[in-house]
Image (spheres, grey):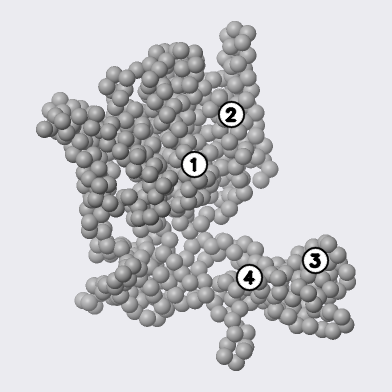
């Protein structure tokens, strides 16, 4: 168990370092720290990838079966998303948003039960990989969007990031659609029904409706601070679907 | 009419109503779920009408992804209604060697157009579970593997002989100890212990750890480790009235689909190795839903590329 934990902890430390470098750059108005932060983020991603690879090898199955493992998968998506969007949009603000999201998620992961357990019969399927990865990619995009929206609101720069928040929301929405569909097809094979109103299903549908409404509102002309606030509200739905349903409600998704 | 039905405000209102229904169901409702009520069906119908009207109005001008995505959603809701009204689900209890075509819902039983016999039921563990004996003596606990014929020496010098290990303890009519099944359902171990200068032969049970606590100079308990189930399998033979026979193995995540029916491995009885519970469903609506899923995914993909 030891090697993968070291790499995963290193990824946490490097993300904190990246966040620190961003903060220092902001406080001391130095431009050079941005490069340090980018390197730290890149190394954090490499460390996390290595850690996940070792964990996969140690478990003999994809590490996607409980909340801790799925959170690591979600974290893995945070880095490429923030790199891609900071490059494509030319907005360096994206990297600190990614670093902050990563640190918050690593903090949450530290609180979770890390005991690896063999897969229960219902989880023994190839659908596990695509379903969980699609959902985690969606949640990662929504997380980066929420942090960026909060940052833009705090700095009153919502116009600057408008295009980019939309693209993140669209990316997350597409992955969430894929996640719900793959989950439904899998449920029809494993549980005997393509939809059972399991709390996780219900709340993921509500999250999906929330983002659908947000995207329609934006199409209608809603811009700036209002759209950022709506994205934050929608992210609250993501948090409830991901954590709240597991800790507060009982259902067939009780493992993660 | 079409204009009013396709309004975005109607869409937002329906989202709000659905959200209210979901929150009510999650937080307050402990009775019959709201999803089966007529008014919830009406909400679904209104949503489908809203999306359909919106796509129809923009049919000539809208890009392909818009039409595909929204048509997909309407088809999914249509499929959901087909499932709601026509889906059949019942339980099929099976016993090794016997054929059955009778399935049960909560309040009725039905005859299937074919019979199913259970050739064999099999439970698979990740690894063979291990029986472990814990001896607590003077506040210190030591754990030993339970292997028949071996002798354990405790820290205080006492010896304990392992006479027999059973996975699923049972008694015959003649009071003989047998393994009722090959599964670790009622694990027990028979030990020969020395207590007060007398030899005692006692059974210790994994499911009842407090036994023989008082009359021994040390505390002995028995437990099974590593009894993690990998999957469970039913080998079945499906016989149609035409005489055709189909042999198949169903397990969790690998159902058998035949003639519109799907047979799922649902459960088993740990105390009866020759019993298996299957669920039989017939749901034509699912194919409509899958068609909707395909259009929706295609639409979303094109929308992202835009």
Give percent across and percent down for residue B180. Answer: 55, 80
Give percent across and percent down for residue B237. Answer: 34, 74
Label 4's element? loop
Instruction: Kindly indicate the quadrant of the structure image that contains residue B85.
Output: bottom left
Vertical side of B113 occupied by B68: above or below: above
Does the rendering let one see residue B136?
Answer: yes
Give percent across and percent down for residue A226. Answer: 38, 20
The answer to whether tags 4 and 3 share a subunit is yes
Q: Are marks 2 and 3 in contact (CB under 8 Å)?
A: no
- Mark with earlier residue (4, 3): 3
Residue at 50 percent of width and 41 percent of height: A243
The numbered mark at residue B136 is 3
Q: Residue furthest left?
A: B1
Which quadrant of the figure contains the N terminus of chain B?
A: top left
- Mark with earlier residue (2, 1): 2
Label 3's element? strand
Q: How many marks?
A: 4
The answer to whether tags 2 and 1 share a subunit is yes
A146, B3: nearer the viewer:
B3
Vertical side of B86 occupied by A16: above or below: above
Q: CA distance from mark 2 to mark 1?
A: 20 Å
Tell me the residue that label 1 is attached to. Answer: A244
């Amino acid at each position: 168990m030891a090697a993968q934990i070291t790499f995963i902890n290193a990824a946490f430390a490097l993300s904190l370092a990246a966040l620190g470098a961003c903060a220092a750059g902001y406080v001391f108005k130095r431009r050079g720290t941005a490069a340090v932060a980018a390197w730290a983020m890149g190394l954090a991603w490499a460390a996390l990838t290595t850690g996940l690879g070792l964990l996969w090898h140690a478990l003999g199955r994809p590490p996607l079966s409980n909340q801790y493992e799925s959170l690591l998968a979600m974290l893995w998506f945070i880095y490429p998303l923030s790199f891609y969007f900071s490059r494509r949009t030319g907005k360096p603000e994206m990297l600190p948003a990614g670093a902050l999201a990563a640190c918050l998620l690593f903090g949450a992961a530290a609180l979770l039960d890390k005991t690896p357990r063999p897969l229960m019969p219902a989880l023994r399927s190839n659908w596990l990989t695509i379903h969980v990865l699609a959902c985690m990619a969606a949640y990662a995009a929504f997380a980066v969007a929420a942090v960026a929206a909060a940052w833009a609101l705090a700095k009153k720069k919502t116009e600057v990031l408008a295009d980019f928040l939309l693209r993140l929301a669209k990316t997350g929405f597409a992955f969430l659609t894929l996640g719900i569909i793959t989950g439904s097809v899998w449920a029809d094979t494993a549980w005997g029904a393509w939809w059972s109103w399991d709390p996780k299903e219900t709340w993921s549908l509500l999250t999906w409706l929330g983002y659908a409404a947000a995207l329609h509102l934006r199409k209608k002309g809603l811009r700036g601070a209002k759209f950022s606030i709506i994205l934050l509200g929608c992210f609250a739905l993501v948090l409830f679907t991901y954590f709240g349903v597991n800790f507060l409600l009982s259902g067939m998704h009780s493992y993660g | 009419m079409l204009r009013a039905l396709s309004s975005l405000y109607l869409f937002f209102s329906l989202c709000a109503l659905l959200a209210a229904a979901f929150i009510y169901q999650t937080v307050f409702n402990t009775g019959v779920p709201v999803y089966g009520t007529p008014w919830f069906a009406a909400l679904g119908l209104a949503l489908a009408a809203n999306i359909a009207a919106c796509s129809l109005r923009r049919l000539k001008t809208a890009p392909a992804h818009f039409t595909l995505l929204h048509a997909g959603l309407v088809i999914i809701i249509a499929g959901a209604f087909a499932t709601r009204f026509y889906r059949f689900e019942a339980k099929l209890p099976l016993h090794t060697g016997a054929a059955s075509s009778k399935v049960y819902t909560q309040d009725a039983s039905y005859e299937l157009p074919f019979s199913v016999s259970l050739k064999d039921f099999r439970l698979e563990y990740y690894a063979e579970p291990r029986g472990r004996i814990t001896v607590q003596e003077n506040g210190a606990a030591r754990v030993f593997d339970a292997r028949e014929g071996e002798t354990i020496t405790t820290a205080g010098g006492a010896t304990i002989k392992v006479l027999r290990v059973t996975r699923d303890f049972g008694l015959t009519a003649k009071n003989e100890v047998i393994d009722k099944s090959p599964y670790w359902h009622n694990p027990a171990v028979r030990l020969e212990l020395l207590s007060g200068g007398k030899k005692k032969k006692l059974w210790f049970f994994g499911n009842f750890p407090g036994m023989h606590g008082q009359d021994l100079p040390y505390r002995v308990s028995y437990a099974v480790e590593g009894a993690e189930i990998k999957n469970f399998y039913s080998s079945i033979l499906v016989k149609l009235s035409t005489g055709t026979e189909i042999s198949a193995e169903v397990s969790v995540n690998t159902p058998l689909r035949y003639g519109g029916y799907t047979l799922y491995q649902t459960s088993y009885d740990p105390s009866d190795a020759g019993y298996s519970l299957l669920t039989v469903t017939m749901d034509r609506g699912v194919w409509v839903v899958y068609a909707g899923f395909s259009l929706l995914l295609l639409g979303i993909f094109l929308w992202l590329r835009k």
